[in-house]
Image (spheres, rainbow, N blue to C red):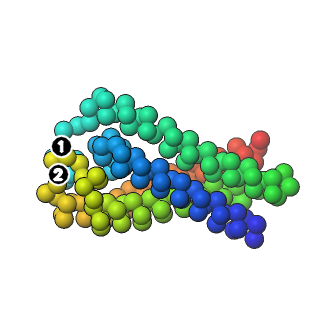
Amino acid sequence: MQLVDHLLLHGTIFGVLLTIYLLAVMKFLNPRIWAMSDYPPEITERVPPQTDSERRTASLAAIPFFILGLGFPIISTLMLESVFGGTISLLDAFLNIFGIMMFGTFADLVILDWLIVGTITPDWVIIPGTGDMRDTAYKDFRKYHGKAHIRGTIIMAVLSFVIAGIIVVL
């Protein structure tokens, strides 16, 4: 029961923090900077490739994302290990890390991708030059990006297992 309670609390906190960060990046940076590769081909084929400046800015914006995305589940798992008396099984470590990452993925998919980009579609998510696609390709974003989350889940499972193994061994 400790694992479930811990995961629900930490997963929720992680989902909220990740959503706030991604929402801020989407809102206050040009959508070409962060999510250019996330948009369907019908949209990205219509606009020029990212500039060097946009790629640099995207790289800088990715640093806090990866620190949060990897650091939070690791710290949470170390806290759980402490709750368990200083030792944690590989399965519990994996379930905690993967579960927290899934909370973040679910929040990103449902809140940002499906609700904000794919349903509400505010002006600040539209790549300049593609505004006429608001009611077509941007609505397809829900299906297109959902498939990307499936691929990402497989990668997260492998990464979670590797990180869990490192935590258990150390």
Q: Is residue 75 left or right of residue 139?
A: right
Q: Compared to 118, does 34 lie above or below?
A: above
Q: Is residue 35 left or right of residue 81?
A: left
The picture places residue 89, in percent across and down from the top left corner, at 77, 56
Q: Dot 2, crowdedness within 10 Å: few (<14), some or many (≥20)?
A: some
Q: Quadrant of the N terminus?
A: bottom right
- The image's mark for residue 47 is 1
Taking the spot 76% from the left edge, 66% from the top edge, the residue there is 2
The picture places residue 148, in percent across and down from the top left corner, at 38, 56
Pointer 2 with pointer 1, Cβ within 8 A? yes
Q: Residue most toward the left? A: 132
- The image's mark for residue 130 is 2
Taking the spot 36% from the left edge, 60% from the top edge, the residue there is 113
The picture places residue 46, in percent across and down from the top left corner, at 15, 47
Give amino acid for label 1: Val
Q: Residue most toward the top? A: 52
Mark 1 lies on a secondary structure that is loop
Q: Dot 1, crowdedness within 10 Å: few (<14), some or many (≥20)?
A: some
Q: Compared to 156, does 109 lie above or below?
A: below
